[in-house]
């Protein structure tokens, strides 16, 4: 494994500077990009640090003791994040996901949750506020997060076999502690829990069925994620991707499944429901999801923007360039000015990397210039 890890070229410095237009237009609540896609979902990375070293995300060989994480002064403060989120909501964002790195490592993250939970849409409604975590600190934090106003949580777990999972997180972290975190989240009232499992062929594919059986009928939606070529350090190879179609076929051979309609526009997961003896979806057994960004690109209705830990705005998970919002936020710009500067950034967006992946020449340098998942969040 180690010999395939590609050294990290630090491209966090690559950025563009937003400009405030001469004519300040107030947000209308609806921004469309060049491909007609609205802005609905904001993913906010609150730390670039993590206590795991998943080989597909933060391989130990690169993220070692010498790796330079962002200094605290570089991070957006909770007030800066909330201000940015409020302006994004005015432009149409309805869903906010906190991520990282490991978001529960950010000190007092529940205070940020409380600030974001107080935001309202122009129609006066609360946001869909959620968080993605590796679950390691969830047993300790679930209650405080719920009390602060978090609605939902997604927990990443790549297998139930302790040896497989310990190898994948590469810090010898046991499955049982993540399961305790999931239970604590359910007990705290965090509803519609999701579990994300990144599937790597030859590494944890034998965990697919045990995971499906374990979460079937528990109220937890298990989502299988194709191993992606995100970042530049994980030494990604196509032959380690297990295509979702193959995964579904394997599951259907053992567990009856029926296709379900997408729950919302821009939904990343294709849904399958567990079927009853009559071949109809049995809601009490629940459903699974498949996130197939390698074999079935879903850029056509991608409505997601991403804010990095240090306040760079990225319009695609595979972008190599971000917009420096932090300088704007730390200037004397008013809310009206910052909001007006955000609008053309989204309106000029035309990213659709996953759709283009197959046709991109290997030599285009993208492999080297991409930002890391741990920096931008999932
Ligand atoms: N640390 C948190 C966690 O693991 O849930 C949040 C951040 S993590 C970057 C967000 C999600 O991205 C996780 O579900 C993780 O499994 C997924 N992820 C990271 N690298 C990936 C890759 N190369 N391919 C597919 N998913 C990946
Ligand atoms: Fe950490 Fe999440 Fe990346 Fe794993 S996937 S190394 S838990 S940020
Ligand atoms: Fe969205 Fe970029 Fe992923 Fe396509 S590749 S779905 S545009 S984040």
Image: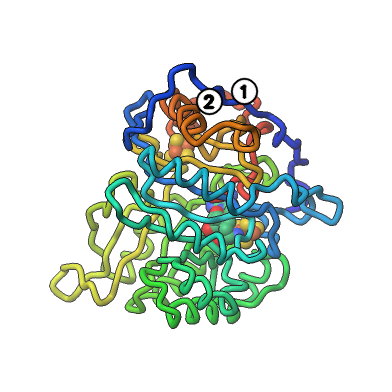
Residue 255 sits in which quadrant? bottom left
As drawn, the label of residue 364 is 1
- Disc 1 from disc 2: Cα separation: 7 Å
The response on whether ligand 3 sits within 8 Å of label 1 is: no
Residue 78 in percent (x, y) is at 60, 54
Residue 35 in percent (x, y) is at 35, 26
As drawn, the label of residue 360 is 2
Task: Classify 261 as above or below 298.
Answer: below
The response on whether ligand 3 sits within 8 Å of label 2 is: no
The residue lying at 50 percent from left, 29 percent from top is: 337
The residue lying at 68 percent from left, 67 percent from top is: 167
Give the farthest residue toward the right.
66
Tell me the SS state at disc 2.
loop
Tell me the SS state at disc 1.
helix
Residue 357 in percent (x, y) is at 50, 32
- Name the one closer to the observer, 69 or 270: 69
Residue 246 in percent (x, y) is at 40, 54
Residue 159 sits in which quadrant? bottom right
- Decide if residue 354 is in sight here: no
The residue lying at 40 percent from left, 77 percent from top is: 189
Give the farthest residue toward the left.
278
Task: Classify 339 as above or below 156.
Answer: above
Is disc 1 in contact with disc 2, using a CB cutoff of under 8 Å? Answer: yes
The residue lying at 53 percent from left, 33 percent from top is: 334
Q: Mark 1: few, some, or many residues within 10 Å (few <14, many ≥20)?
A: few
């Amino acid at each position: 494994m180690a010999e395939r890890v590609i050294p990290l070229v630090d491209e966090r410095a690559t950025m563009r500077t937003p400009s405030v237009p001469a004519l300040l237009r107030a947000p209308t609540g609806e921004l469309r990009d060049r491909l007609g896609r609205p802005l609905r979902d904001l993913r906010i990375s609150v730390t670039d640090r993590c206590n795991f070293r998943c080989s597909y995300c933060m391989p130990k060989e690169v993220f070692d003791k010498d790796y330079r994480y962002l200094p605290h002064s570089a991070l957006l403060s909770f007030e800066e994040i909330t201000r940015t989120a409020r302006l994004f909501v005015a432009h149409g964002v309805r869903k906010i996901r906190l991520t990282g790195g490991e978001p529960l490592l950010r000190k007092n993250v529940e205070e940020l949750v409380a600030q974001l939970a107080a935001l309202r849409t122009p129609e006066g409604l609360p946001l869909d506020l959620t968080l993605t975590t590796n679950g390691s600190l969830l047993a300790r934090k679930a209650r405080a997060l719920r009390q602060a106003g978090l609605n939902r949580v997604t927990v990443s777990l790549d297998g139930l076999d302790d040896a497989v999972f310990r190898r994948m997180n590469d810090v010898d972290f046991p499955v049982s502690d993540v399961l305790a975190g999931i239970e604590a989240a359910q007990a705290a009232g965090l509803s519609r829990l999701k579990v994300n499992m990144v599937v790597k062929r030859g590494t944890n594919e034998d965990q697919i069925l045990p995971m499906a059986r374990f979460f079937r009928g528990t109220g937890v939606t298990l989502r299988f994620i194709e191993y992606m070529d995100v970042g530049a350090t994980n030494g990604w190879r196509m032959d380690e991707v297990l295509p979702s179609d193959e995964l579904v076929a394997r599951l259907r051979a053992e567990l009856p499944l029926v296709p379900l309609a997408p729950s919302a526009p821009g939904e990343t997961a294709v849904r399958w429901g567990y079927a009853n003896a009559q071949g109809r979806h049995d809601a009490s057994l629940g459903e699974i999801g498949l996130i197939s960004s390698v074999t079935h690109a879903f850029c056509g209705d991608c409505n997601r923007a991403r804010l990095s830990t240090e306040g760079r705005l990225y319009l695609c998970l595979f972008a190599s360039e971000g917009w420096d919002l932090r300088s704007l936020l730390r200037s004397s710009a008013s809310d009206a000015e910052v909001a007006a500067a955000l609008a053309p950034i989204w309106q000029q967006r035309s990213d659709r990397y996953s759709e283009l992946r197959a046709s991109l020449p290997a030599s285009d340098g993208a492999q080297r210039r991409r930002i890391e998942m741990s920096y931008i969040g999932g």
